[in-house]
Amino acid sequence: MSSSIIEAESVLAVDIGSVFTRALLFDVVEERYRMIAATQVSTTVGAPFFDISESIFQTLTRLEEITGRRLMEEAHLLLPTQEDGSGVDRFVLTFSAGQPLRVVAMGLLEEVSLASARKVLESTYCQIVEQISLNDRRKPEAQIDAILRARPDLILIAGGTDQGATRSIAKIVDLLTLALQLMTAESRPEVLYAGNSAITKQVCDRLEPYVRPRTVPNLRPDIDRENLMPAQEVLSEIVYLRRSHQIGGLQSYSTISAITPQPSLRAFGRMVQFLEKITNPPLGVLGIDLGSATTGIAMARSGTLTTQAIPIGSGFGLAAALEQSPLESITRWLPMHVPNEAVRDYLWHRTLYPTAVPTSLEYQAIEQAMLRQILAQVANRVAPDEGLYGFEPILVSGYALTQAASPAQSLLMLLDGLQPIGVTTFILDPYGLLTALGAIAPLNPTLVVQVLESNALVNLGTVIAPLSSVRYGTPILKVRYELESGETSSVEVRQGTLVPLPIPNGQRARLHLQPLRPLRLTPTGKDTARSFKVTGGLLGAVIDARGRPITLPTDSARRRDLLKRWIATLGG
């Protein structure tokens, strides 16, 4: 037996969301780490408890019922594992619940230093409430008033390449110093300096009578080079410190956590980056975690990780999504007639009661239509120009997407909303496993690898989405596939159609693509015959030849018939 298993440890991972609290228990089974059990309950961050302790207690009680293993003693988690096998060895905590940090970004140039500052702030749960730069035309006193009105939790200062501008940075710092003097000591925000490293000491000396600034290496050491990771790491710490004052019980649970509690998106992104590293050949990996208040995006490509926390979601964040979406962009996805007023009323009601379950097929259809629009906004953030191409796989987390009434509904929502191009495998994470493993990874990488190898994630299916400009109904592609059993089959694909390939779940198959008309599997460049292997998912594999962007009929009756036909084609 390997030394890693001899030293095996059980781990409990808890994630505090704005609507749900999830708990996952990991331990060794037959000399391999496995996810033993998972559960979720309603979060108790808000009324009437205003403390996460109650929801954690409820998840532990459920885990005890599921596993028959005693995890608590006098309502407290047993750490470490006891001689009788009760308790756990390690506990880790992640969180996305709580109000976003209110941030004032200060820098030299809007399109350079402030652009880098925005990338850092978008990587976690922050809201930029004010921006001040050298080309800000407001008078200094107006800028100071703007800072005071913003009531920031954090001020981020960026600008100047290393050994570059010093006077301009000094001017920004002097402005901030005046604003800090007008604040009470209790209301002064955290300050993070991420500008010209050559004057870090002078900046600290200037600010320290009022605050103790944190410093990180320059975001833009050169005009053409960014260094965002150090600032993102410190920002995660600041987010935790602020949330620990907002969320009851977070500080007390941090004392038993094996590592400092971290934002859920940071842990989620760590796993996306890990999966990109082990993909062979290395391809881009995209992760989407659709929560109630925030949608997290993690992209790993060419060894670089980018994360974004978009303040839209399926519950509390629905209001922001609705404000950015014309109603017709939602209602066009409804397979039945529902009056606009009813759609609008239901969605706004959903923002007040994010845990409500749809009580009719119409309400379910409205929610799924809205999710398509949210995913379209995600795709626009990820690839605003060339379309969603080059990600293999796409990992999907979040209750609304992973717990749909059928796998076909999940896949169709993802295809209609994201509209990927080329070859993409959709992997569902129904238990929040990626966030939990991302938190555990620094402590026990062996556990992470072995749990991933245990098929705890769900392969929804591989999608091949060719681009062609021919007329609807024209044959564009012949697909022949060979199963491991030796059985072969072929199908002709016509423009504008969805074609499922019945490859059994978990089985490998080789696909042979023979274009019948000019088509592309990339945004640029023509494709000739191709051959590659895929693994069948819950829905086997699917050819999506509906074009990009997907064009729906303007006639309402024809459009609804087409939507019904698509879901029937996939077996939903």
Image: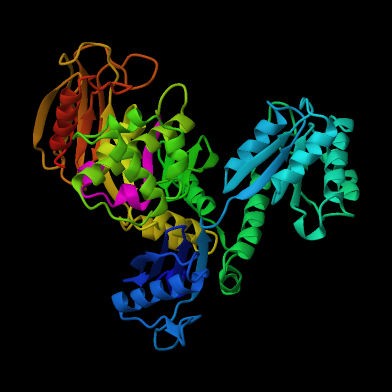
Above or below residue 412? Residue 71 is below
Tell me: residue 112, above or below residue 446. above
Q: Quadrant of the N terminus?
A: bottom left
User: Considering depth in this image, is 427 or 151 the residue closer to the camera?
Assistant: 151
Q: Which residues are magenta?
A: 390-409
The correct choice, above or below, for 221 with respect to 470 in the image is below
Q: Nearer the viewer, residue 118 or 142?
A: 142
Examine the structure image and report whether residue 511 is included in the region drawn in magenta: no
Q: Is residue 406 magenta?
A: yes
The residue lying at 23 percent from left, 11 percent from top is 470
In the rendered view, does 525 fall on the left or right side of 94?
A: left
The residue sitting at 76% across, 56% down in the picture is 187
Q: Specify the quadrant of the image occupied by residue 492.
A: top left
Q: Nearer the viewer, residue 283 or 546?
A: 546
Q: Is residue 251 above or below residue 116?
A: below
Is residue 417 rendered to the left or right of residue 508? right
Q: Farthest front residue?
A: 341
Q: Position of residue 451 (x, y in %)?
A: 37, 60
